[in-house]
Each structure stands twice: as structure tokens, then as C-alpha cells.
């Protein structure tokens, strides 16, 4: 009868943004399945910019696109956003259409309203 075999501990760490998930003692068979699945997912994934490339270009660039997406996500009208920031609605429209640039100061104001990093608007 074979003696007790010592199992080497396995550990998986998965990082998602700021979160880190640690799994310890994962059986080797399951570990291989997880790794294969993650590799397949990585191979099948497409960067969001390439999916939205046409819309970004049509919108007037990435900052303009991000401004509109953030505004629509909160279900704000241009007028409502303009009131929040003490701006004219036409200024918001020009920024969303890429006809007016979004400077660093304005990007920080948008970031506060939308709770995102200001650099997405630059």
C-alpha cells in the first residue's frame, strides 16, 4: 500500500482592477482547467477601443466619446450637466462633438460629477 503523498500547495491570484482574489489549495486538475479557460478568454477578448473605434471617430475623438458615454450613463441631459457645472449647454455640446477641447481643469470637473479618473477626458 502506497504511503501518504505530500501535496504541494497551489495558489492562484487573479487581479481585477484594484481587487485581488487569492485561491489556495486548488487541486491540480482544476487548476489546469482554470488556466485553460483564462487563456481562452484572453485570446477571445477584444479591447473596447477597437469595438467602439467607428463611434469614437464619428463622435470627434475619445474625450468627446467618453464625455457623452458618462453623461448618458447617469441619464443626464446636456442642459442638466451644464447646470451642475455652471456652463452653457452649447459648450457641453461642442465638447461632446469634438469641436471644443476638454482641458485639464474641465476634465477634473467632469471627473468629479461622473466619479471617474479625469484623464479619460484628455
Image (tube, helix red, strand yellow):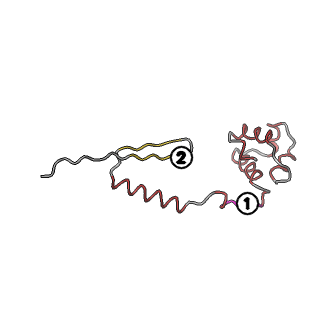
Q: Residue at x 38, y 53 (%)?
A: 31
Q: Is residue 55 left or right of residue 43?
A: right
Q: Secondary structure at mark 2?
A: strand
Question: In the figure, 67 relative to 36: above or below?
Answer: above
Residue 71's x, y, as percent? Answer: 73, 46
Q: Is residue 53 left or right of residue 80?
A: left
Q: Which mark is residue 11?
A: none
Residue 91's x, y, as percent? Answer: 86, 46
Q: Which residue is mark 1?
A: 55
Dot 2 crowding, Cα within 10 Å, few <14, some 14–19, many 20+: few
User: In front: mark 2 or mark 1?
Assistant: 2
Residue 44's x, y, as percent? Answer: 53, 62
Please tell me which residue lies in front, 30 or 88. Answer: 30
Q: Residue at x 12, y 52 (%)?
A: 1
Dot 1 crowding, Cα within 10 Å, few <14, some 14–19, many 20+: some
Q: Secondary structure at mark 1?
A: helix
Please tell me which residue lies in front, 117 or 7. Answer: 7
Name the magenta segment's main secondary structure: helix
Residue 94's x, y, as percent? Answer: 85, 50
Residue 97 shown in magenta? no
Q: Of the residues under marks 2 and 1, which one precedes in the sequence? A: 2
How far is mark 2 from mark 1, CA to CA?
27 Å
Q: Mark 2 and 1 residues: CB-CB less than 8 Å, in contact?
A: no
Q: Write down the region rendered in magenta.
A: 51-57
Q: Which residue is mark 2?
A: 16
Q: Is residue 119 left or right of residue 6?
A: right
Amino acid at each position: 500500500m502506497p504511503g501518504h503523498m505530500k501535496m504541494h500547495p497551489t495558489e492562484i491570484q487573479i487581479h481585477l482592477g484594484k481587487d485581488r482574489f487569492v485561491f489556495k489549495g486548488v487541486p491540480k486538475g482544476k487548476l489546469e482547467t482554470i488556466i485553460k479557460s483564462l487563456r481562452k478568454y484572453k485570446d477571445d477578448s477584444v479591447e473596447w477601443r477597437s469595438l467602439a473605434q467607428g463611434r469614437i471617430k464619428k463622435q470627434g475623438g475619445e474625450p468627446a466619446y467618453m464625455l457623452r458615454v458618462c453623461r448618458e450613463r447617469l441619464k443626464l441631459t446636456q442642459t442638466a450637466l451644464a447646470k451642475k457645472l455652471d456652463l452653457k449647454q452649447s459648450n457641453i455640446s461642442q465638447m461632446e462633438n469634438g469641436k471644443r477641447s476638454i482641458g485639464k481643469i474641465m476634465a477634473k470637473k467632469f471627473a468629479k460629477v461622473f466619479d471617474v479618473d479625469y484623464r479619460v477626458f484628455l
